Amino acid sequence: MSSIPKLKHKSAEEAKDTTQPRDHLEVMGGKVPSKFADPCAHAAKASMACLERHSYDRTKCAEAFQNYRDCKKAWVLQRRKDRAEGREGAFD
């Protein structure tokens, strides 16, 4: 029986910051190989919620979209850094 690592719960304030990805090793640590896991899912959900609130008027959700792009960029850069530094689990 494999052990699935428990994820750390973020504070309410940390969870609201959609510009920063969650630690990809925590997010990916318990994923099944065929299951997609996204440390920026919270930012994606915030973008979709914005669209729904504003009847899919994209012009009113520019900030939410930029937050998602910033999160994804930070995630990619962090993964590169972790791999370059040989962080345990970074190659899974």
Image (tube, rainbow, N blue to C red):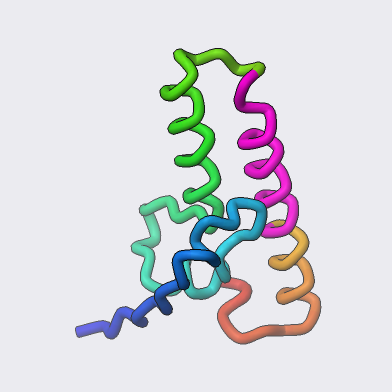
Q: Residue at x 72, y 84 (%)?
A: 86
Name the residue nearer the viewer: 43 or 13.
Answer: 13
Q: Quadrant of residue 52?
A: top left
Residue 22 is situated, as x and y percent measured from the top left of the image, at 55, 65
Q: Is residue 54 above or below residue 12?
A: above
Q: Residue at x 46, y 72 (%)?
A: 11
The boundaries of the magenta stretch are 60-75
Residue 20 within the magenta-colored segment of the rendering: no
Q: Is residue 56 above or below residue 45?
A: above
Q: Is residue 31 above or below residue 68?
A: below
Quadrant holding the N terminus: bottom left
Residue 85 is situated, as x and y percent measured from the top left of the image, at 78, 83
Q: Main secondary structure of the magenta part?
A: helix
Q: Residue at x 67, y 44 (%)?
A: 67
Residue 54 is situated, as x and y percent measured from the top left of the image, at 49, 19
Total tally of numbered discs in the picture: 0
Residue 44 is situated, as x and y percent measured from the top left of the image, at 52, 41
